[in-house]
Image (cartoon, coloured by chain):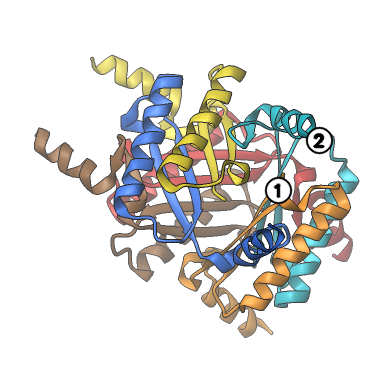
Chain colours: A red, B yellow, C blue, D brown, E cyan, F orange
Amino acid sequence: MPYVNIKITREGATQAQKAELIAGVTDLLVRVLDKNPATTFVVIDEVAMEDWGVGGVPVEQYRKRLKART
Amino acid sequence: MPYVNIKITREGATQAQKAELIAGVTDLLVRVLDKNPATTFVVIDEVAMEDWGVGGVPVEQYRKRLKART
Amino acid sequence: MPYVNIKITREGATQAQKAELIAGVTDLLVRVLDKNPATTFVVIDEVAMEDWGVGGVPVEQYRKRLKART
Amino acid sequence: MPYVNIKITREGATQAQKAELIAGVTDLLVRVLDKNPATTFVVIDEVAMEDWGVGGVPVEQYRKRLKART
Amino acid sequence: MPYVNIKITREGATQAQKAELIAGVTDLLVRVLDKNPATTFVVIDEVAMEDWGVGGVPVEQYRKRLKART
Amino acid sequence: MPYVNIKITREGATQAQKAELIAGVTDLLVRVLDKNPATTFVVIDEVAMEDWGVGGVPVEQYRKRLKART
C-alpha cells in the first residue's frame, strides 16, 4: 500500500498530465514491487514559484541566473 | 510534541469539522501517549480531486468505476 | 481516502499504542467526515530525540530547560 | 525541479528495485512534464509494518483479515 | 542534496520574506554541513489558519485563549 | 507556529551539527517572520544513500558520474 507524493512547481500542468503521472507511478509500483493498485495513493502538490527555492533563491530567479550563464 | 498531518480530498469539509478533527487527534495523543496538547500540532491539507490518485486513476474516476461495478 | 501522518519522538511507544492511534484516527475520520476506513492510511514516524527541535534546541534540552524553570 | 516521496512498507525492497523506482519516476516526470532530471529528487521511505495502518488496523492484521474473507 | 519543507500559517508573508527564508536555510546547510546549494531545495507551504491546530483547537482560537490568560 | 522538516542524506551528521541546524532554522523564522520559538518545530530526517535519487539514479552513482565528467 504505497503512498506517493509528487511536488512540482505550479506551471500549468493539465488534468490529463496529472492523470498520466498517477497512472505512471502506480504502474511502476505494480511492476517493480508487485503492489496492489487499489491501495496505492498518489498525491500531487503544485507549489507556487515563489514558494520553491533552489540554489538559495526562488526558482524563477534561479532559472534566469542559469540562462545568463549560457 | 507530536506533529500530525491529515490529507483529505477537497470536498467541502467545514471549519467545524476541521476543528473536530484537530480536537479529536489531539485528545487521542493525550490519551494514548500522554502527550502535551500545547505542543501538539495538527495540519490539515485539502487536496483537489484531480490531484489525488488511487487505483491508477484520479479519485473521481475511481469512484465512478467502483459504482459501475455494483 | 485520507492519508494521515503522525510524527512522535521515539520514546518507546508500544505496538499496542500504535494500533490504538491507528484505530483512533481512522474512527475519527469515519465519524467526522464519513470517510471509508478501507481507504484510510495512517503512517506513524518515530523521530530520534536528537532529530526533533523545539524552542531552538533539541527536545531533551528543551525539557530540561522547562523543568529548571519550575 | 520536482520532489517525489515514495512511502512503502518495509518488506525487503532491494537496492536494485529502489534504483528502478528512482529511474522510473524520474523518466515519467521528464516524459510527461519535460522536467530536468538533474533537479528531480526522489526519496524513498520504508515504513515498518507496525507503523502503517489501513482499515483502522496495522497492515499485517489488515492482510490477514482480507485473506480470511476469501 | 537536502530538501527542506517550511510550513507556516498563512498570514501575509511577502515574496521578499520568503526569499529570505530560502536564502537563510540554504546558507545554513552550506555552513553547517557543507551542502551544495545547487542541489538544495526549499519548499514553503502556507497553511490556512483554520487548517492548523495547536492545543487541541484551531490556531486563532489558541491565540485568543493565550491572550485571555494574561 | 512553524513546522520545518529537513531531509539530508545519512552521512554522519553529528548531534552538534543537528543542534546547529535546529538553532539556525529557528532563529531565521524568529528574525524574518517574528515567529515564537516555543512553537517552532524542526524535524530532521536522515535518509539512507540508496533511498535518495537525483538525475534518475541513486545519489552515490550520481556523484560518481559528476566526478567522472570533471
Chain of the residue where label 2 is placed in the rendered structure: E
Q: Nearer the viewer, residue C56 or C68?
A: C68
- The residue that mark 1 highlights is F39
Q: Where in the figure is residue F35, as x and y percent of width and height? A: 80, 47
Residue contact at pointers 2 and 1, CB within 8 angstroms = no
Location of residue D13 with respect to F16 vertically, above or below: above
Q: In which quarter of the image is residue F1?
A: top right
Amino acid type assigned to the residue bearing label 2 in the image: Thr
| Closer mark to the observer between disc 2 and disc 1 | 2
Q: Where in the figure is residue D65, as x and y percent of width and height? A: 16, 38
- The residue that mark 2 highlights is E70
Residue found at x 36% / y 64%:
D17
Q: In this view, does F39 lie to the left or right of D57?
A: right
Amino acid type assigned to the residue bearing label 1 in the image: Thr
**Distance (Cα) linking label 2 and label 1:** 18 Å
For the residue labelled by badge 1, is the local secondary structure a helix, a strand or a loop? helix
Residue found at x 70% / y 76%:
E33
Quarter holding the N terminus of chain C?
Answer: top left
Location of residue B30 with respect to D49 vertically, above or below: above
Q: Where in the figure is residue F61, as x and y percent of width and height? A: 52, 76
